[in-house]
Amino acid sequence: MASRSSVNFLDLASGGLLDIPHTPRGLPRVMTVPGIISDLDGYGNNDEDSDVSSSSSRERKIIVANMLPLHAKRDAESGKWCFSLDEDSLLLHLKDGFSLESEFIYVGSLKVDIDPSEQEEVAQKLEDFNCVPTFLPHDLQKKFYLGFCKQQLWPLFHYMLPMCPDHGDRFDRLLWQAYVSANKLFADKVMEVINPDDDYVWVHDYHLMVLPTFLRKRFNRIKLGFFLHSPFPSSEIYRTLPVRDEILRGLLNCDLIGFHTFDYARHFLSCCSRMLGLDYESKRGHIGLDYFGRTVYIKILPVGVHMGRLESVLDLPSTSAKVRELQKRFDGKSVILGIDDMDIFKGISLKLLALEHLLQLHTKMQGHIVLVQIVNPARSSGKDVQEARRETYLTAKRINEVYGSPDYEPVILIDRHVPRYEKSAYYAIADCCIVNAVRDGMNLVPYKYIVCRQGTPTLDAAIGRYAESPRTSMLVVSEFIGCSPSLSGAIRVNPWDIEAVAEALHLAVCLSDSEKQLRHEKHYRYVSTHDVAYWARSFAQDLERACHDHYSKRCWGIGWGLGFRVVSLSPSFRRLSSDHIVSAYKRTNRRAIFLDYDGTVVPETSIIKSPSPEVIDILKTLCSDPKNTVFIVSGRGRKTLSDWLAPCEMLGIAAEHGYFIRWSKTSDWETSHPGADLEWIRIVEPVMKLYTEATDGSSIETKESALVWQYQDADPDFGSCQAKEMLDHLENVLANEPAVVKRGQHIVEVKPQGVTKGLVAEKVLLQMVNSGRPPDFVMCVGDDRSDEDMFESILNTLSSHSLPAPPEIFACTVGRKPSKAKYYLDDAVDVVKMLKGLADATNSKPRYLAQNQVSFESAV
């Protein structure tokens, strides 16, 4: 397969994780326009510089998974490797969701070791299958897959913690390094074939969770989706992983992340909230996480089965023959079927104990009920698997010895490779199917059972069944498997409750045929319409939607190693350069400066909330310049602000979002809404007290004109949930009151109607215009949602009045995030540094010029 990109990129992983040779990154292009940062910001968005062309118009999807959908074996005569498609692979089945014009490229490893001397030949041979092999060295493959994936990630994601060395392997940094190295090799293979402008990349499962970071660093605007086929654990479990942040950030470098169930998605979102401080919201029915200006969407949809593949196996003569054989063998008996991998999470021994309890409790069923348990080969080896196998055999032997007879075995254990046609035959004759896993990502066994119980016309004719005869099926499924929520007609059980599982099996066998038929019809409607093609098509459509605005924004990379992420914002949004604003400051004469307080001149995370001596000195200097009108516009109370800012005598203060305004220390406080009705406070206060008592870590701040409920120290999930509930509650009780309810960063605030920071900016600017001193320089800096009102008000006020010359406006938000402001600074430290530059510019004026300016202002 021809390579579409031959450029390697700088090794991401810090700490010497990777020792794979790489090509050093070239120097980035740098823009030198004042106030505008480089597109590449020192990291490089290589989308425009790539040697990849967009010549291909055919829609291509690059499917990346741990294993390629291939079978491999050596030819006995030639000794050459021979390959064939794995017709049972999900990666092949998902193609049915797309048109024939869609091209699929598969990137992954082979299930066999290929000698380095044969790798080039094998890679060329696999071009015929549209497959790009990733050849991992044997030792790396072992540490990556059998080590980190199977010994650490897989048990943890199934809620198994390594509490002691005998049960679960402790975290091993060397295995983690192997995981990162393997993910980078997969990423390198994707880069060889990708056309980043047109191709979509779809990464599958927990083996490749940091691969998106490598791809996003190389191609900032790559169209990238990820689907997790295993459970995602709750935050209490996941947070025990030492590399938890690196994996979360890897997933967040995707555009769309898919999960089988809402529970798994909810756990992931909770982890992002608790560990990375990220908020999420529903946007037109789609859950989205705002991550540095990019929206990472969450997809919740269980995978389906390939209907055509299942039905084609049912139509085989061998299947019909096997069905006839099994019908004869189990004539007069009720067959319960279980098909599971041999591992500790599938609950096979719990299932056998439930059957034993059933035979004990309902003696009439002895001799009439049979559990056929097919055991698929274990996907991993270890002490846990051996113990599970031993317990399974001992339990089955005991049950057969106690309840069996020469012509009756209650448990038939099939522990060998079972051909697909034979499994389909067992599905077709089973009266009930039980999936008793204690934890499983999805599990498609119930879906396959439903399809096989429906049968096909060919199978009906072969076994002598009327096509119009009613079809029945019964499912007993664990509450802890991914397919459980979609099977509303199944009997859901807690696999740990052996008595309840036994009763569920009894009920499943004894239900009337009419009810079994209704349940079957309901399930078959769902399974047949939500097949693998539907799942793949739906995911691809959402991925396209998530990527549609990639080229409408500027983006650049920040962060080192596996902490790399891309900032993506409006093309007009840029970093505020100190040189740029100081230059404008020096050449203007009538300046209006509006500054928020918390999170702007004082860091949000600071324990000491009073201004530092440096901030006080800067504000005093700016206020001392008669060209300046400086205002602190804050949500804090007027007493607090006036005490903290007392040294700044010429500083204007707008407290409680502008309800109180003071032009200088010597002037009186003005009220923006004199005589405002504040009786609603009596309604709000008991409601907030109720939520405060119920939410540990929350508190109420009482202001003169407002009440604020704060939950910064509460549990983030519970606090957010309580805030949403309180918002609805207060909006209902205040429907006819002159008050508004606003939700901010970890707060819910109730204040009088019409009080906004935007009105403060409007009032000050109009005062300057009406006094004959229209501003020629306006700066407004803030970090919160309430500051967006100021940004908008400044633009509206100045554009609605005819001024001698348009002023230079510097609306600046703190933090790189979507905003109505044109500029941003990273944090309060940058804000203070920028203000210090303005203060230095004020102090640097020649004395005689300053004196002349004072005389001029006095004359005016």
Image (cartoon, rainbow, N blue to C red):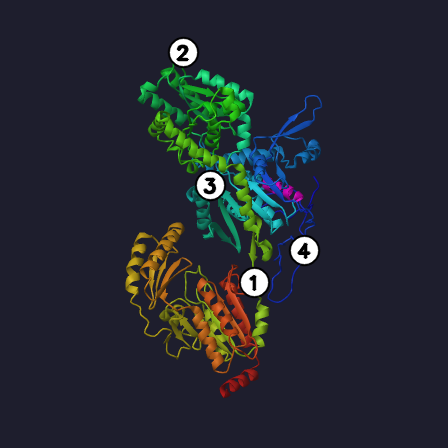
Residue position marked by numbered label 3 in the rendering:
232
Looking at the rendered structure, the secondary structure element under dot 1 is: loop
Q: Is residue 17 magenta?
A: no
Query: Closest to the observer: 3 or 185?
Result: 3
Residue 342: tell me if it is visible. no
Residue lying farthest top?
406
Q: What residue type is labelled 1?
A: Phe
Q: Residue 114 in the image: state x and y as whole percent.
A: 65, 31
Q: Which amino acid does label 2 sit on?
A: Pro
Q: Give the range drawn in magenta.
A: 181-193
Left or right placement of residue 301 versus residue 365 in this view: right
Q: Which amino acid does label 3 sit on?
A: Phe
Looking at the rendered structure, the secondary structure element under dot 4 is: loop
Residue position marked by numbered label 4 in the rendering:
27
- Mark 2 vs mark 1, CA separation in Å: 81 Å
Query: Closest to the observer: 358 or 284?
Result: 284
For label 1, the crowd category at 10 Å Cα-Cα, with few meaning under 14, some 14 to 19 and many 20 or more, is many
Residue position marked by numbered label 1 in the rendering:
573
Residue 162 found in image quarter: top left
Q: Dots 2 and 1: beta carbons under 8 Å?
A: no
Looking at the rendered structure, the secondary structure element under dot 2 is: loop
Q: Residue 524 in the image: state x and y as whole percent.
A: 46, 33
Q: What residue type is labelled 4?
A: Leu
Q: Is residue 686 above or below residue 77?
A: below
- Mark 4 vs mark 2, CA separation in Å: 80 Å
